[in-house]
Image: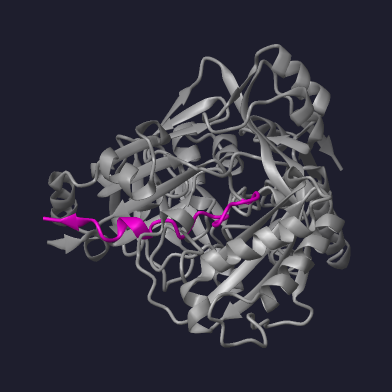
Amino acid sequence: MTSNDVRIVSPCGILGYGFPEESFNRAFENNQKVHGIVVDAGSTDAGPHKLGAGVAIVSRRSTKKDLDIIIKNGVPRGVPIVIGSAGGAGAKPHVEWTLDIIKEIMAERCLTAKIAVIWADFTQEEIIKANYEGRITPLTPNIPALTDEVIQETNNIVAQMGHEPILEALKNGADIVVCGRAYDPSPFAAVGIYCGKDPGLSYHLGKILECGALCAEPGTTKDCIVGTLKEDSFIVQSLNPIRKCSPISVSAHTFYEKEHPYILHGPGIIIDLSQCEFTQVSEGAVEVKNSKLIKNDHYFIKLEGARKTAYRTFVIAGVRDPILVENIEEIEELVKEQVKDYYEDIPEEDYSINFYNYGKNGVLGSKETAPFQGYEIGVMFEVVAKTQEIANSICSSVRSTFLHYGYESRKSTAGNLAFPFAPSDVEFGPVYEFSLYHLMEINENPFVIEYL
Amino acid sequence: MDTLFDLAKVLRSKNAGPFELTFDILFDSKEVYERVKKSGKINEQTICELYNLTADQIDHLVFFDQALGIKITILRDISSGTVGDRDVYGAQQHAPLMNILID
């Protein structure tokens, strides 16, 4: 390591996933300088519910455990700490939840720090206006059309920020930067760029580090990794000696959870990894060169928003009787018909009854081609409806009808379903959908920074 | 003849955002990667048949030689985590690819 090198530590793939403290401490061994501790807290992977309902994907307890290690090491040493997509979805309730935990830790450890909060929230009015101005386009053709009505039903609208507001917060001396929704690599790139390193390398390093040690072998999101930015390359290395980075493990990671293997679209940028070279420089350490950043002529940010579409109640049960197993789909159809007849007073469009037959085609549904060979099926059935009361009522009737349904040639006349739990019916609550997953063109930075 | 499952080091599916599903087929030797690539078996028609898609529902089918990998990205029928979705993370949708036979 030379004096111009910039070292960025990523403790884990999602804040609150947990990581070994020994791994984290290795980053500081032999008085090595660390230029930033950056952790991505966000993901849309867990579906629209987190954003829509304003809740986190990880527990408060585990988030506090992770943040405590980060803060007690980072703040006294003066190492900037950046949290991307705080609270998971990065909307106001998620950011506030994260801030609350940080303040609690700071008080418990008698520490003080300049905290910058970068909000990523947008109002419905802003989105409606931008939509009328033709500044909003869907990311892919299967995204539902954006109408005023859809926008008005969408709460917690956020957009992914680039590195610019984070860079500004660092320049203004923030010790801890809590970002609302951010493009996953942005918080890492901001530290690299703040320290004078190449933006293309900084973004590519961010893309790798945001998953924790997933690019090492054995890969995991629950362990620490360090990236070292040099003049025309960067090096990635696990902070746990049992995990090794190899050219294949690192280059393969560039595939992970994005639509194209070497062209990445970010806020205002394209990252071109087509000419990258991956070289083993020492055991477990890989050097990467030629990551290129292209600035877009027009600056687009990605909007995310979720709206409530229905309420769900569901039941899990096992089926073991061979006649029932063999005819499961036909019998479920008959159960459905009987329940629909019973509730003729409720409009059919107000609810739907769905069966999932685990062990048969629960995962792939109609795309399953493997022949069924099992002797038991895990049945999950759900009712999704306009109101929770309708979902509960109809699900209760589906359950009782299914349990006692007298299908043809039945021998097990006492009951059809093995419920693992009592009560059998689980009130799930609201179901959300991603109603906004669009690009919005912007002319000036819309992300507001607040210093605490 | 070998199955793709036997030849690949990594064969996985995952969301690429809530509206797309992406498949990665990665290899640990250049020889095996080239064998699969040259077989011509990984093509749009195969993917359409296995996943019951039309060609316009395939966003990308890319061979990335440096990384010894193939990426296929398709449009989801139902977006992640809403009513009717069976796989919120899209992490178990790779199974139909496993039995593709490679000469």
Q: Which residue is drawn at 19% across and 52% down?
A: B33
In the rendered picture of this protein, how many numbered marks are placed on residues? 0
Residue A288, position as x, y percentages in the image: 35, 45
Q: Is residue A352 above or below residue A260?
A: below
Q: Does the magenta stretch include residue A227?
A: no
Q: Is residue A433 above or below residue A123?
A: below
- Residue A175 visible in rendering: no
Magenta range is B81-103
Q: Does the magenta stretch include residue B82?
A: yes
A395 or B31, which is in the foreground? A395
**Residue at the extreme top:** A133
Q: Which of the image's four quarters has the C terminus of chain A?
A: top right
Residue A211, position as x, y percentages in the image: 52, 55
**Residue at the extreme front:** A409
Q: What is the basis of the colouring in this image?
A: one colour
A177 or A419, which is in the foreground? A419
Residue A126, position as x, y percentages in the image: 79, 22
Left or right for A142, reference A340: left
Residue A314, position as x, y percentages in the image: 71, 65
Which quadrant of the view contains residue A443? top right
Left or right for B68, reference B89: left
Magenta segment, prevailing SS (helix, strand or loop):
loop
Q: In this view, does A380 lie above or below A38?
A: below
A421 or A185, which is in the foreground? A421
Left or right for A305, reference A244: right
Which quadrant of the view contains residue A277? top left
